[in-house]
Amino acid sequence: MTVVIFTGGEALTVSLIGEIPDDAYLIAADSGLDHALGLGLDVDLVVGDLDSVTDSALDRTSAAIERHSPDKDATDLELALEAAYRLDPDRIIVLGGHGGRIDHFLGSVALIVAERWSDIDIEWVTPQARIRPIRGGITLHGTTGSTLSLLAMSGPAMGVSTTGLRWNLEHETLEPGSTRGVSNVFMSPVATIRIDSGTLVSIQPDPS
């Protein structure tokens, strides 16, 4: 089962429709509903304090509404992820940007790689980047010559090995606060990353 979460922030490009499986369960985080409807898609559930979604979008949707107080302790994206997690999905795809606020962007990256979602394949696709947490190992797809950055999160990532990149690693350690993994390059359409322990986040600045 795949759950797709539409976030608020900047509008989504039509090309992102291709990221959505036909049988996915769709959740909108607050004004993410406007973005989903803008792509011609209604959602199954709207989650948030509803302070930014438009009245016209709420009038047009047939979705269930999970409304939270504005005095909440979590962002609308976090609430949407919690709602998705309750569905016990195999995969979660988050679609949307951060609206230009660096605090929201950093908070969302930290949220995406949080340990509590570690048993789910999760990916965040924005109009500018594709972001995924890596634990154990993963196969990534990208255009030859495109950029891939690997950053350690929540402690060192140990035993990191890669294939398909210009600068491959062999059982090496990437430390938090180090830029060693920034701006690697796909040398083929497929790259593999393996980790003995720890967590990496992969960032592909070109989301295609």
Image: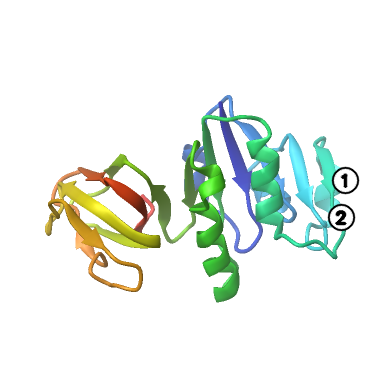
User: As displayed, is residue 81 above or below residue 128?
Assistant: above
Disc 1 target residue: 59
Determine whether, in the image, residue 22 is placed left or right of residue 130. right
Residue 120 visible, this angle: yes
In the displayed structure image, the side of residue 16 where residue 194 appears, left or right: left
Indicate the position of residue 162 as horizontal and vertical percent values.
18, 48
Mark 1 and mark 2 in contact? Answer it, CB < 8 Å.
Answer: yes
Q: Amino acid at mark 1?
A: Asp
Q: Residues within 10 Å of mark 1 (few under 14, many from 20)?
A: few
Q: Mark 1: which secondary structure?
A: helix
* Colour convention: rainbow
**Residue 165 at x, y = what percent?**
15, 53
For the residue pair 150 and 143, the one nearer the viewer reads as 150
Q: Position of residue 171 (x, y in %)?
A: 16, 51
Residue 12 place in picture, x, y as percent: 56, 54
Count of marks placed on residues: 2
On residue 120, the disc is: none
Frontmost residue, 91 versus 158: 158
Q: Quadrant of the N terminus?
A: top right
Q: Amino acid at mark 2?
A: Asp
Front residue of this view, candidates 103 and 86: 86
Image quarter of residue 84: top right
For label 2, the residue is 55
Helix, strand or loop for disc 2: helix
